[in-house]
Amino acid sequence: MKKLLSLILCTVLMLTVCACSRQNPENPENTTQVNSGYNTVLNNGNLKLAYSKTDSLNPFECKTKINMQISKLLYDGLFTLDGNFEPQKVIAESVIVGGRTVNVTIKDAVFSDGSKITSSDIEYSFNTAKNSDNFSAILDNIVNITISSDDMVMFVLEKPDPYAASCLYFPIIKKDTAVEDADPVGSGRYQLYKDGEKSYLLVNTKRTGFNPVIKKIFLEPIHDSESAESSLVIGNTAFFYSDLSDGKFSRINAKYCNINLNNIVYMGFNPDCPFFENPGIRRAVSYALDRDRICSSGFSSHAVPAELPFNPSWYALKSLASSQSSTIEKAEELIEESGIDLKSRVLVLMYNAENGFKEETAKIIRDRLQKAGFLVNLYGVEAEYFADELRDGHYDLYIGEVKLQENMNLEPLFTGKASKGFAAGSESGEKYLSFTSGECEIMDFLNTFNSEMPFVPLCYRNAVAFYTNSMNVDFNCSENDVFYDIESWSIN
């Protein structure tokens, strides 16, 4: 009898060990952990995100993109931007933009410690943001802030900007809480808590109108962005964001969704090339291109075609029709009208040879231009030498990329700060300033641009958000806040 009992006990132990070591490789999130869910990706409606433990979650000080993204959950701004880059009121109750002033009325809202948000907090937050590397660029056109009343502030602009409200997403924190080695007090959707070496976020109960399915978010420390991707792949975390700036897209076993970036990819002209002194030839180049193929093949479907200099996702363009369509016939017509012999010169198209998207795009552009009658050679340049080659004029055409601010400010393209060629000092640049100052309509600027074609818009790039297969997510966000619609996220 003792031998029989011993045999039964051994069998039970063996089955227990086997059961504990068995995993489902297709559903690692279903693996049960001992410590109430801290090491699981998804547990009881909770979520697990990667973050850099060596970096701060203070939005004014953090250096890594993953921590900056998480800080959006902890700190609200006056506004946030949706997937169409349209400002949505958060702490702001109302806004009036006119001339060189922006008047904002503040909602009756409180910080996570229960204290009321006042104009003094807005002023303190603005001055802190203005001196922060993370927000100084977007606030560059705002000269100062004045307090009109306890619930109203006025921002003074250096230049008129009808879309200045899109710049007011900087974090609002409680006055005098941005001190060294401390987390400022915010009013965000979640609050940060620490339990020894572990950090997690809980829903901010003081914030009204926010009732998500995901009540708790665990933070998993990682070393770098590559570790963040690996963490999702092996099932340690549930979300990974990549801006695809390296020109590569690696498909992994997870769902993914494109996210709008405000990075314009364009083609610039060398003003010393006699072909391009003729605006008709510059327009012919634009007509000859196949932007759909550039996006689908060149950028592996992680870009959207752009015939206008503005982001095609921008809410202000909703009522505007596309100005042209790609057609070789129209390009040939313009070439014939110019009287220029295209066989008299072989054009050099320069691109970043270290970026796979740009290299494939250069090949597509070459083939289309040659179909229209141009002779084109490709010139791939390593990234560190690209600016030097651009400055020295070792090109006829080049593929460039500029990250624009969320108010769609095109000035960097027209001042020579971010582009070379005909854009600097162009008639289009002057007309753009007239548009932003209220002296003309947006179509007046676009008509001038399409006629002059100082540079050729190609597309706007996308970023990609990867997330575990057990999550249900319908993204309507921009890079400004990748967790814009986290309230609607759910877990199977």
Image (spheres, grey):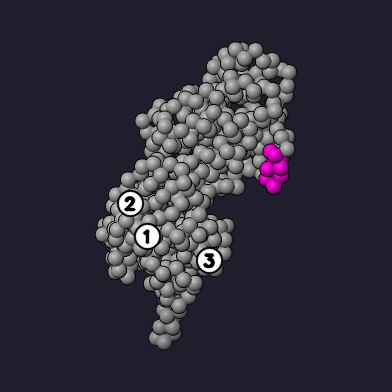
The residue that appears at 45% across and 60% down in the rendered structure is 127
* Badge 2 density bin: few <14, some 14–19, many ≥20, Cα 10 Å: many
The residue that appears at 57% across and 30% down in the rendered structure is 426
C-beta proximity under 8 Å, tags 1 and 3 = no
Distance from the alpha carbon under mark 2 to that under mark 1: 10 Å
Identify the magenta region: 382-391
Residue wearing tag 2? 104
Q: Amino acid at mark 3?
A: Asp
Task: For residue 232, say whether it is visible.
Answer: no
* Badge 1 density bin: few <14, some 14–19, many ≥20, Cα 10 Å: many
Q: Quadrant of the N terminus?
A: bottom left
Q: Amino acid at mark 1?
A: Ile
Q: Nearer the viewer, residue 415 or 244?
A: 415
Q: Amino acid at mark 2?
A: Val
Q: Relative to residue 396, is residue 194 depicted above or below?
A: below
Distance from the alpha carbon under mark 1 to that under mark 3: 25 Å
On the image, which quarter does residue 75 sit in? bottom left
Residue wearing tag 1? 122
Q: Secondary structure at mark 2?
A: strand
Distance from the alpha carbon under mark 2 to that under mark 3: 33 Å
Q: Nearer the viewer, residue 38 or 356?
A: 356
Horizontal side of residue 271 vs 161, given as left or right: right
Q: Nearer the viewer, mark 1 or mark 3?
A: 1
C-beta proximity under 8 Å, tags 2 and 1 = yes
Q: Position of residue 265 (x, y in %)?
A: 56, 37
Residue wearing tag 3? 55
Q: Secondary structure at mark 3?
A: loop
